[in-house]
């Protein structure tokens, strides 16, 4: 079982959106997935309530429960647990980073957003975690995106896919779907499948690594 945490203290970056659509894409690729939601805003639980099927399973938890739940999940049949976190620097976010095999850090390509992810990155480095820096809500083509991307590609943490700003993301979530269910042939679905395939490769063969708090 591998754990993927969606972290960055900047709200509105796309943590919940990517968590949901990647969880669905992972399921469609044959993985069994559950989602732990540590954010009281409950974006993922709201989404699950609108859903017609009962997978992926979603559980709302707080930081104090995470270690116990991870121990139980490790003995379960799940291939992946996705952890959605709140948009603040909280004990929950740190616990999620600690529990993760890979941290997904979504970021909009604006100067303010690119500055705001630095404390998250510092925590990830401190805990010696792998991470993926995902440029989200990008325009289809932009020099700014390429500039943001160029510096990071050398670190091997930048997936070969940017997630473009597309209505499919908002429409899918409103209907309790992932983008690959809502519009399987659309560009948003294609980007999410590409991103999942990058993440799946990067988490293959990674041992689960949870240290006690
Ligand atoms: N790639 C995208 N294209 C269009 N809208 C997006 C995209 N990613 C996120 N959004 C929208 O941006 C808003 C914030 O996203 P959300 O996932 O809730 O961020 P976070 O969980 O980091 O606070 C939501 O309204 C969501 O629908
Ligand atoms: Mg959220």
Image (cartoon, rainbow, N blue to C red):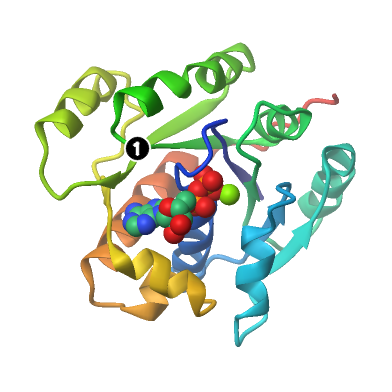
Measuring from the top left, give residue 172's x and y in whole percent: 43, 73
User: Can residue 18 be spotted in the picture?
Assistant: no
Q: Quadrant of residue 32?
A: bottom right
Against 108, residue 46 (above or below) is below
Q: In which quarter of the image is residue 91?
A: top right
Percent across and percent down for residue 21 are: 46, 63
Query: What residue is shown at x 57% (from left), y 36% (from top)?
Result: 7
**At 63% from the left edge and 48% from the top edge, which residue is drawn?**
84
Which residue is under mark 1?
A: 108
Number of marks in picture:
1
Q: Name the one closer to the observer, 190 or 199.
A: 190
Comparing 90 with 28, the one in front is 90
Tell me if the residue at label 1 has its CB under 8 Å from ligand 1.
no
Query: Residue 142's x, y, as percent?
Result: 11, 38
Q: Is residue 11 above or below residue 40?
A: above
Residue 117 left/right relative to 161 = right
Which residue is nearer to you in this view: 144 or 37?
Answer: 144
As drawn, the residue found furthest toward the bottom would be 52
* Up/down of 143 relative to 56, above or below: above
Helix, strand or loop for disc 1 = loop
- The residue drawn where x is 62% and y is 85% is 53
User: In the image, is 58 to the left or to the right of 195?
Assistant: right
């Amino acid at each position: 079982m591998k754990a993927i945490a969606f972290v960055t203290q900047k709200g509105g970056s796309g943590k919940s959106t990517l968590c949901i659509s990647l969880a669905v894409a992972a399921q469609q690729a044959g993985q069994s997935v559950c989602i732990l939601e540590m954010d009281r805003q409950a974006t993922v639980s709201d989404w699950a309530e609108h859903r017609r099927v009962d997978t992926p399973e979603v559980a709302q938890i707080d930081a104090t429960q995470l270690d116990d739940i991870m121990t139980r999940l490790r003995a379960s049949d799940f291939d992946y647990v996705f952890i959605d976190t709140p948009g603040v620097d909280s004990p929950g976010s740190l616990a999620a980073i600690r529990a993760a095999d890979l941290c997904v850090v979504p970021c909009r390509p604006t100067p303010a957003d690119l500055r705001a992810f630095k404390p998250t990155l510092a925590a990830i480095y401190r805990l010696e975690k792998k991470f993926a820096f995902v440029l989200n809500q990008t325009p289809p083509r932009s020099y700014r995106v390429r500039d943001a991307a160029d510096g990071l590609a050398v670190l091997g943490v930048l997936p070969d896919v940017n997630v473009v700003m597309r209505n499919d993301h908002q429409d899918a979530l409103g209907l309790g779907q992932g983008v690959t269910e809502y519009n399987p042939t659309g560009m948003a679905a294609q980007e999410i499948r590409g991103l999942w395939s990058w993440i799946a490769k990067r988490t293959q063969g990674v041992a689960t690594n949870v240290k006690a708090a």
